[in-house]
Image (spheres, rainbow, N blue to C red):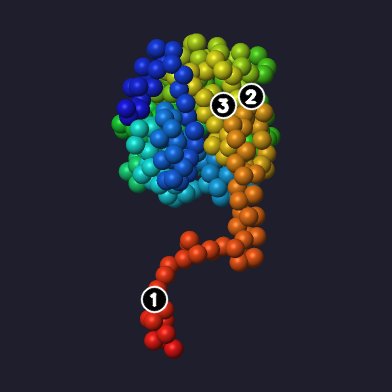
C-alpha cells in the first residue's frame, strides 16, 4: 500500500513505528521500497556520502532534483521526501514555494523537508498552502553547523530545550505533517513526541519518537569518514565491497576473469575468413 501523509498520521494514532531511510539513486530506492520501508528521504546528506563534500551546504537544487527523480522512479510504495537545500528557502517565502514546487514537479517528490523552527514557519505555511506536504526538521540542523560551531547535540540546557520544544510546536502549527528530531537528548525527544499530534521521526533523539531515520550508507557500513553516536550498523558492506573489488582486480590481472562462461562465441570458419 502506498505510504502517504495520511498513513503517516494514522500510524502515529495507532502507535505504529514509522521507518525512513535515505536513498539517492534508483537501484537503492528500489531495494528499500521492496523491503517495505515507509519513507525514503532524498537527503542533502548526499553532499557528504555521494558527492564528497565536508557538509551539506554546497548541495544545489539541481543536485536534489537529479537524485530525487531517480529515487522516485524506484519507489512505488514509500513516501518520497526530498530535502530543500541550503538557501533554497531561507531567502524568502516566494523562493521557498517556487523551489518546493520544483522538487515536486521535476524531482517527483511526494513531500519536501526543510530545516528550522520558528524562523521558517512562514515558509512552511506558504508551501503547505500551495498544496505541498512539508516535513519539518528541528534540533541539530546540519545546514546550520557553522552557527552551531559544529555537529553538537542540541537542547541540553533548559533554554535550549525550550527552544527545540517551541520550534517543534511551531512547525506543527504551521502545517507540517511530520517533524524530524535530530541530535537531542532522549527525554526531550520523548516529551516532544508525546506533545505533538504529528509524527516525530528521530535521528539521535531516542526510541520514544514515532519513527526513525538513518543514512543508509551508515546503516550498511559503507561510509567511514565519520560515524555519529546514533548510528547502528546492521551490516559491514563496505568491507565486503572492498574484498570483491580486490578479487576482481586480482582475477583481471591473472587472466582468470573473464573465463569461458563470460565470453561470446563465433564459428571458427567465420574468423578464418577475416584473415
User: In which quarter of the view is residue 103 placed?
Assistant: top left
User: Disc 1 vs disc 3: which is toward the camera?
Assistant: 1
Q: Are marks 1 and 3 in contact (CB under 8 Å)?
A: no
**Label 3 residue SS:** strand
Q: Are marks 2 and 1 in contact (CB under 8 Å)?
A: no
User: Does 8 appear above or below 233?
Assistant: above
**Label 2 residue SS:** loop
User: In which quarter of the view is residue 78 placed?
Assistant: top left
What's the mark number on residue 267? 1
Q: Are marks 2 and 3 in contact (CB under 8 Å)?
A: no
Q: Position of residue 42 (x, y in %)?
A: 46, 39
Q: Position of residue 125 (x, y in %)?
A: 38, 27
User: Disc 2 vs disc 1: which is toward the camera?
Assistant: 1
**Label 1 residue SS:** loop
At label 1, counting other C-alpha atoms closer than 10 Å, the crowd grade (few under 14, some 14-19, many 20 or more) is few
Question: Which residue is located at x 34 percent, y 36 percent?
Answer: 76
Mark 2 vs mark 3, CA separation in Å: 12 Å
User: Does 216 appear above or below 52?
Assistant: above
Quick check: can you spot residue 142? no
Mark 2 vs mark 1, CA separation in Å: 70 Å
The residue that label 2 is drawn on is 154
Question: Which residue is located at x 49 percent, y 11 percent?
Answer: 195
At label 3, counting other C-alpha atoms closer than 10 Å, the crowd grade (few under 14, some 14-19, many 20 or more) is many
What's the mark number on residue 134? none
The residue that label 3 is drawn on is 203
Question: Which residue is located at x 40 percent, y 73 percent?
Answer: 266
Q: Is 70 or 27 nearer to us in this picture?
A: 27
Mark 1 vs mark 3, CA separation in Å: 60 Å
Q: Quadrant of the C terminus?
A: bottom left
Quick check: can you spot residue 167? yes
At label 2, counting other C-alpha atoms closer than 10 Å, the crowd grade (few under 14, some 14-19, many 20 or more) is some
Amino acid at each position: 500500500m502506498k505510504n502517504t501523509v495520511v498513513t503517516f498520521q494514522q500510524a502515529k494514532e495507532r502507535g505504529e513505528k514509522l521507518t525512513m531511510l535515505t536513498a539517492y539513486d534508483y537501484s537503492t530506492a528500489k531495494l528499500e521500497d521492496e523491503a517495505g520501508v515507509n519513507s525514503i528521504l532524498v537527503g542533502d546528506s548526499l553532499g557528504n556520502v555521494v558527492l564528497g563534500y565536508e557538509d551539506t551546504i554546497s548541495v544545489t537544487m539541481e543536485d536534489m532534483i537529479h537524485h530525487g527523480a531517480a529515487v522516485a522512479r524506484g519507489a512505488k510504495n514509500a513516501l518520497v521526501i526530498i530535502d530543500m537545500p541550503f538557501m533554497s528557502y531561507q531567502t524568502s517565502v516566494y523562493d521557498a514555494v517556487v523551489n518546493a514546487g520544483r522538487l515536486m514537479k521535476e524531482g517527483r517528490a511526494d513531500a519536501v523537508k526543510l530545516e528550522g523552527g520558528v524562523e521558517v514557519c512562514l515558509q512552511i505555511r506558504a508551501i503547505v498552502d500551495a498544496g505541498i506536504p512539508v516535513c519539518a526538521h528541528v534540533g541539530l540542523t546540519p545546514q546550520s553547523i557553522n552557527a552551531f560551531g559544529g555537529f553538537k547535540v542540541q537542547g541540553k540546557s533548559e533554554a535550549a530545550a525550550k527552544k527545540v520544544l517551541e520550534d517543534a510546536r511551531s512547525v506543527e502549527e504551521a502545517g507540517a505533517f511530520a517533524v524530524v528530531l535530530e541530535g537531542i537528548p532522549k527525554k526531550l525527544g520523548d516529551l516532544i513526541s508525546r506533545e505533538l499530534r504529528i509524527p516525530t521521526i528521530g535521528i539521535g533523539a531516542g526510541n520514544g519518537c514515532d519513527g526513525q531515520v538513518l543514512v543508509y550508507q551508515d546503516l550498511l557500513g559503507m561510509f567511514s569518514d565519520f560515524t555519529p553516536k546514533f548510528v547502528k550498523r546492521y551490516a559491514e558492506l563496505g568491507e565486503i565491497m572492498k574484498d570483491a573489488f580486490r578479487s576482481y582486480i586480482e582475477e583481471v590481472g591473472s587472466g582468470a576473469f573473464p573465463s569461458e562462461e563470460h565470453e561470446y562465441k563465433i564459428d571458427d570458419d567465420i574468423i578464418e575468413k577475416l584473415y
